[in-house]
Image (tube, coloured by chain):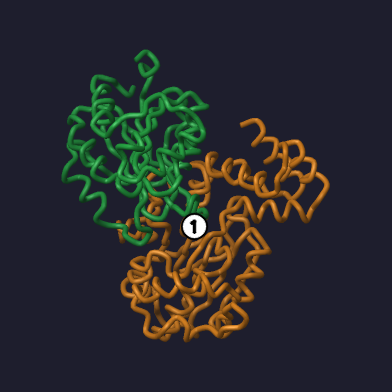
Chain colours: A orange, B green
């Protein structure tokens, strides 16, 4: 544990990013994984490089945060979003959506496709944030491996999308390029959920399988931030095996889908 | 037997060929069994419903899938949720992860054994059952190094021997026994209290 603390301190001093309140076991696993991949022999070697090499530390941060994602993960969640949640918040004004910790963007493209198929994409204003500029670049570019589209397509089919997922991208050299028009109303920006506060008010916030990497205190703080970023009767969607139960801030919400972990902001 | 007197948590890892042994175990555990039982079983990523329900049919203890941050409590059997890795924190709460497959698996038995071994040390009893790949072998070894009591299903008795055999490449577990002996082993903890 002392070694982990030393690494966290070194990263904070170098980049101002603080991992102190990340969930211990998964964070420790990510560090050990990085050490193995980079064939580093000791914690001291790692700390030395953090202190002297900025690019190395950026790469470390990208590797220790989990950026494994897929489009329409848990299709049942997206079905409830399309059929139940969005109809309740789509009014005459623009639909404001925040994808918090959007990683490489798959979730954002899923939302854009969902909105396009129900004719609401033009009326939507989406903000997608992550602490990591590397992954935001990937999200902005919309270029992904063709291999990962097999799972994405399966999810999209279960979601009962109106077309084929391949209608939304073109293939080049083993990569797929998603249609740029999908993100014309999306603003990608750098924001550290763990340290930065609210910056706007939204009708819907999606933050799925991110809280699992935060400890109790940090989860409480983030849920409070979400509470301040939502108007009355706005919605929050989290991961299928996450819960607001452990947070005092859960009192700001009522659970509207037990199965899919979707909450509505009270007053 | 004295090495097992501190056991407070039982962790079972299983893959292909293990489900009927799991069924035997669950139907033999008495209703007032106090120690939490963790089942880390390889399962389809996209099938979220049905598994817990089917296990509950033969189980006398309630089987549930833990939520992230849920505390480990006595009297329950916890099943690893689909498409997540299952971890246990030093504070004895569950944690989940969506990181890459480990040994082609999510949930990975290595992850469960490793983190529970770190968080419970000599209070963990780890049991590795049948499976066609080597997931769980390294994790059981890491738990062993942290003081856990380790059991593997005898490869000759297991439907698929690869998984328990892989553990033998790392170390010699405390017990190498048949499925019926595993059922008896677990029953031997029936008067243990978690608190």
Report the side of A122 relative to A20 (left or right).
left
Say which residue appears at 48% left-offset and 78% top-offset: A112
Above-or-below relation of A9 to A72: above
Above-or-below relation of A75 to B122: below
Q: Write down the residue under mark 1.
A: A226
Above-or-below relation of A138 to B71: below
Q: Nearer the viewer, residue A21 or A42?
A: A42
**Quadrant of residue A184 in the image?**
bottom right
Q: Is residue A263 visible?
A: no
How many numbered marks, from 0 up? Answer: 1
Report the side of B22 relative to B60 (left or right).
right
Q: Chain of mark 1?
A: A
Q: Nearer the viewer, residue B139 or B73?
A: B139
Say which residue appears at 33% left-offset and 37% top-offset: B156
| Residue lying at the far right of the rendered structure | A52
Q: Is the residue marked by circle 1 packed among few (<14), some (14-19), or many (20+) residues within 10 Å?
A: many
Say which residue appears at 43% left-offset and 75% top-offset: A153
Q: Residue B34's spot in the image, x, y percent?
A: 26, 27
Q: Residue B17's spot in the image, x, y percent?
A: 30, 47
**Quadrant of residue A58 in the image?**
bottom right
| Residue lying at the far top of the rendered structure | B2
Q: Is residue A204 visible?
A: yes
Q: Secondary structure at mark 1?
A: helix
Q: Residue B52's spot in the image, x, y percent?
A: 25, 49
Q: Residue A255's spot in the image, x, y percent?
A: 32, 56
Q: Nearer the viewer, residue B87 or B109?
A: B109
């Amino acid at each position: 544990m002392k070694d982990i603390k030393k690494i966290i301190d070194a990263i904070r001093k170098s980049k101002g990013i603080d991992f102190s309140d990340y969930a211990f076991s998964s964070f420790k696993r990510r560090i050990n994984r990085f050490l193995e991949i980079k064939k580093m022999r000791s914690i001291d070697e790692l700390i030395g490089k953090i202190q002297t090499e900025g690019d190395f530390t950026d790469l470390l941060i990208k590797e220790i945060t989990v950026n494994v994602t897929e489009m329409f993960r848990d299709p049942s969640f997206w079905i409830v979003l399309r059929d139940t949640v969005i109809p309740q918040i789509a009014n005459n004004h623009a639909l404001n959506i925040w994808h918090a910790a959007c990683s490489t963007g798959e979730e954002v493209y899923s939302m854009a496709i969902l909105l396009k198929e129900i004719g609401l994409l033009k009326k939507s204003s989406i903000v997608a944030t992550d602490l990591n500029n590397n992954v935001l670049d990937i999200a902005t570019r919309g270029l992904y491996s063709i291999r990962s589209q097999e799972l994405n397509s399966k999810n999209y089919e279960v979601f009962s999308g109106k077309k084929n997922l391949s209608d939304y991208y073109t293939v080049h050299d083993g990569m797929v390029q998603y249609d740029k028009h999908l993100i014309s109303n999306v603003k990608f920006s750098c924001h550290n959920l763990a340290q930065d506060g609210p910056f706007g008010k939204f009708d819907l916030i999606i933050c799925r399988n991110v809280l699992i990497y935060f400890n109790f205190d940090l989860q409480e703080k983030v849920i409070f931030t979400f509470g301040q970023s939502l108007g009355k009767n706005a919605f929050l969607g989290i991961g299928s095996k996450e819960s607001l139960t452990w947070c005092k801030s859960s009192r700001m919400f009522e659970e509207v889908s037990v199965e899919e972990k979707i909450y509505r902001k009270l007053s | 037997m004295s090495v097992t007197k501190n056991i407070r948590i039982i962790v079972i890892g299983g893959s292909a060929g293990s489900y009927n042994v799991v069924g035997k175990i669950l139907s033999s555990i008495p209703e007032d069994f106090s120690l939490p039982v963790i089942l880390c079983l390889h399962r389809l990523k996209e099938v979220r419903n049905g598994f817990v329900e089917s296990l509950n049919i033969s189980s006398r203890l309630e089987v549930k899938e833990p939520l992230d941050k849920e505390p480990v409590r006595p009297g329950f059997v916890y099943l690893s949720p689909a498409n997540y890795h299952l971890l246990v924190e030093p504070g004895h709460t569950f944690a989940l992860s969506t990181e890459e497959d480990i040994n082609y698996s999510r949930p990975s038995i290595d992850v469960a054994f490793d983190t529970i071994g770190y968080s419970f040390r000599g209070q963990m009893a780890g049991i590795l059952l049948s499976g066609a790949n080597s997931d769980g072998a390294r994790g059981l070894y890491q738990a062993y190094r942290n003081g856990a009591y380790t059991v593997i299903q005898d490869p000759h008795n297991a439907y698929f021997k690869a998984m328990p055999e892989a553990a033998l490449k790392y170390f010699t577990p405390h017990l190498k026994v048949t499925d019926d002996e595993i059922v008896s082993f677990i029953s031997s903890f029936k008067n243990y209290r978690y608190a």
